[in-house]
Image: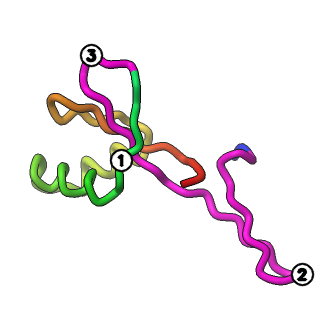
Amino acid sequence: MSSENIQKFNLGELIILEIELTCYEVKNIGEHRWQKIPEKAVMERFADSFDPVTPILSRMLKGEEIVVSPEIYRVINCKC
């Protein structure tokens, strides 16, 4: 786990909590630039496009890019 993807919260002198955040990105097919997108927007798009949604979310959380024409979605670890 790389240090740039971890946020550290000092909750006192004795405890440090490290949290790696999950963010989502989208791009149009044929474009090269990814843009961050709110989780709610991804979930709404998937709910409108897939039934059931859980297998698609599982695939994406394992690193697969998901195509919902005309867009491609992916998950990244980041500092949001």
The magenta span reads 3-32
Against 44, residue 29 (above or below) is above
Query: Does the magenta portion include 4?
Result: yes
* Quarter of the figure that contains the C terminus: bottom right
Residue 16 quadrant: bottom right
Against 32, residue 36 (above or below) is below
Query: Front-most of 73 and 28?
Result: 28
Of the two numbered discs 1 and 2 in the rendering, the one whose residue sits closer to the viewer: 1
Which residue lies at the image location 83% right of the left edge and 83% below the top edge?
Answer: 12
Report which residue position mark 1 lands on.
37
Answer with mark 3 or mark 1, whichever residue precedes in sequence: 3
The type of colouring in the image is: rainbow
Q: Contact, CB < 8 Å: mark 3 with mark 2?
A: no
- Residue 75: image location, x then y, percent: 42, 44
Q: Contact, CB < 8 Å: mark 3 with mark 1?
A: no
The crowd level at tag 2 (other Cα within 10 Å; few <14, some 14-19, many 20+) is few
Q: Which mark is residue 30?
A: 3
Q: Give the CA distance from mark 3 to mark 2.
A: 50 Å
- Residue 41: image location, x then y, percent: 26, 54
- Residue type at tag 2: Glu
Q: Give the CA distance from mark 3 to mark 1.
A: 18 Å
Q: Is residue 37 left or right of residue 8?
A: left
Which residue lies at the image location 73% right of the left edge and 70% below the top edge?
Answer: 9
Which residue lies at the image location 31% right of the left edge and 19% below the top edge?
Answer: 31
Element under label 1? strand
Element under label 2? loop
- Residue 3: image location, x then y, percent: 75, 47
Q: Which mark is residue 13?
A: 2
Element under label 3? loop
